[in-house]
Amino acid sequence: MTENSPLAPQPSSDSAVRASEPKHCSSFRDFVERVVLPRLMASPAHTRLDGQEGVGNRTVAGRFWFDDEYWKVHSDTHYEPLLLAYWHARAHGELSTFARTSTASGDRLALNAELTRLRGGRPQHLYIYSE
């Protein structure tokens, strides 16, 4: 039976929708490996998860479990701070990678002080919020 055979199983529209839904990952490292790296490898010239420039995008690219709750990552997050955090988390653990800060709409994760210094104080472009 070939793929185009009428007897071959056909993907349902439900599976296409599920494939486009943001993934729930077990950890930050899992999120980077399952969501961030495949996107970056597919489009290495992009600087953001959504491939856009300049305009904000609050669409959720994925979620990960961290510090006893799920965190959502917006699609306008840049690759560079995610990858810096990923390598720090691999070497030193995830809990020491981020600093929890408060915003008017809830908590967000920022890079820790050491990683912020490494980046020279530039804007983080890291949009990770509590669910």
Image (cartoon, grey):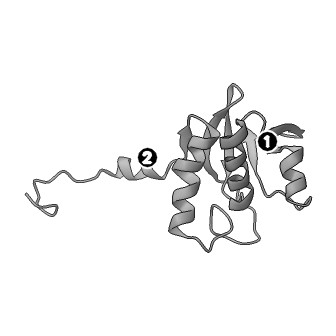
Q: Viewed as shown, does residue 80 lie left or right of 6? A: right
Q: Secondary structure at mark 2?
A: helix
Where the N terminus falls, by quadrant? Answer: bottom left
- Badge nearest the viewer, 2 or 1: 1
Q: Viewed as shown, does residue 96 lie left or right of 103? A: left
Q: Where is 28 relative to 9, above or below?
A: above
On residue 48, the disc is: none
Residue 92 position in % (x across, y down): 73, 38
Residue 52: quarter of image: bottom right
Q: Secondary structure at mark 1?
A: strand
Q: CA distance from mark 2 to mark 1?
A: 27 Å
Residue 4 position in % (x across, y down): 15, 64
Q: Which residue is mark 2?
A: 18
Residue 51: quarter of image: bottom right
Q: Which residue is mark 1?
A: 109
Q: Residues within 10 Å of mark 1 (few under 14, many from 20)?
A: many
Identified at 54% across, 49% down, the residue is 33
Identified at 70% across, 53% down, the residue is 82
Amino acid under disc 2: Arg
User: Closest to the observer: 95 or 8?
Assistant: 95
